[in-house]
Image (cartoon, rainbow, N blue to C red):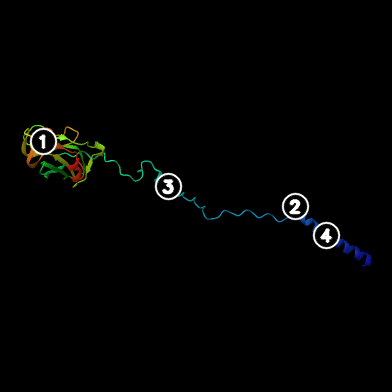
Amino acid sequence: MSTVRRAALVLTTLSAALALTACGPAEDDAAGGTGTTPAASPSTASSEPPSKPSKPSAPSTSSAGSSSAGGSSGGGTPADYDVFPCSTFDVTFTASLAEPTTSSYLLKVTNKGTKACRALGHPVVTFGDLDGAATERGTAPGIEDALRLAPGESAYAGLMGGADDGKGRTVGSIAMTMNTESDLEQTPLTASTPNLYVSPDINSVTPWVNNVEDALSL
């Protein structure tokens, strides 16, 4: 084979190879390719189930409790609206001679029950078989401020006597009922009072107080 013909064959072979190389991308395009690396497909969902939303925590009650309505103000004690007046069914009664020269007596009542009661106003004191009652001396507090007697506590009042003025007589006992500011019937409580002189405008009684000194000095 001549040299010229051999060179032409080599050139023809190279041209065919180059043509095949150039056709590669085109064939890819024809098959739907883009000539670039395709984007990665999105990852599939995790096999684990999605976590549940967390449960909301309960609101704090520390501040709510301090501002709630109906709380006690300043830690004070509620008023004793359920404490009723003492009657003779609630107390024991004694009378003791306090001043022999004037025949004055110290009266004492003690709450014998299991609940508190209030000793209201003045005791109502009568003298044996005589008509009338001792007059009230001094001002008693209102029912809201009346003396509160817890079980076992006592209240005191002073019954004043006097010298024989020729208008009265002596008695050996007295009877006492409590002021209840109601029409409650009470059984009078009696006490011995030897040689107590009873006369109009002489005998008077103080309101119930919580100590002996005030009972005998009012």
Q: Which residue is mark 1?
A: 126
Q: Position of residue 15 (x, y in %)?
A: 85, 60
Toward the viewer: 150 or 198?
A: 198
Q: Nearer the viewer, mark 3 or mark 2?
A: 3
Q: In the image, what residue occupies the spot 80% across and 59% down? A: 21
Disc on res. 29 = 2
Instruction: Give the mark, 3 or 4, whose residue is nearer the N terminus.
Output: 4
Q: Under tag 2, what secondary structure?
A: helix
Instruction: Give the mark, 3 or 2, whose residue is nearer the N terminus.
Output: 2
Q: What is the distance, in whole Å, between disc 2 and disc 4 at their CAs?
A: 18 Å
Q: Nearer the viewer, mark 2 or mark 1?
A: 1
Mark 2: amino acid: Asp
Q: Which residue is mark 4?
A: 18
Q: What is the distance, in whole Å, between disc 2 and disc 1 at their CAs?
A: 132 Å
Q: Is residue 59 left or right of residue 10?
A: left
Q: In the image, what residue occupies the spot 40% across and 46% down? A: 66
Q: Which residue is mark 3?
A: 63
Q: Is residue 124 visible?
A: no
Instruction: Give the mark, 4 or 1, whose residue is nearer the N terminus.
Output: 4
Mark 3: amino acid: Ser
Q: Nearer the viewer, mark 4 or mark 1?
A: 1
Instruction: Give the mark, 2 or 4, whose residue is nearer the N terminus.
Output: 4
In the image, residue 97 sits, relative to residue 27, either above or below, namely above
How many residues crowd around disc 4 within 10 Å: few (fewer than 14), some, or many (20 or more)? few
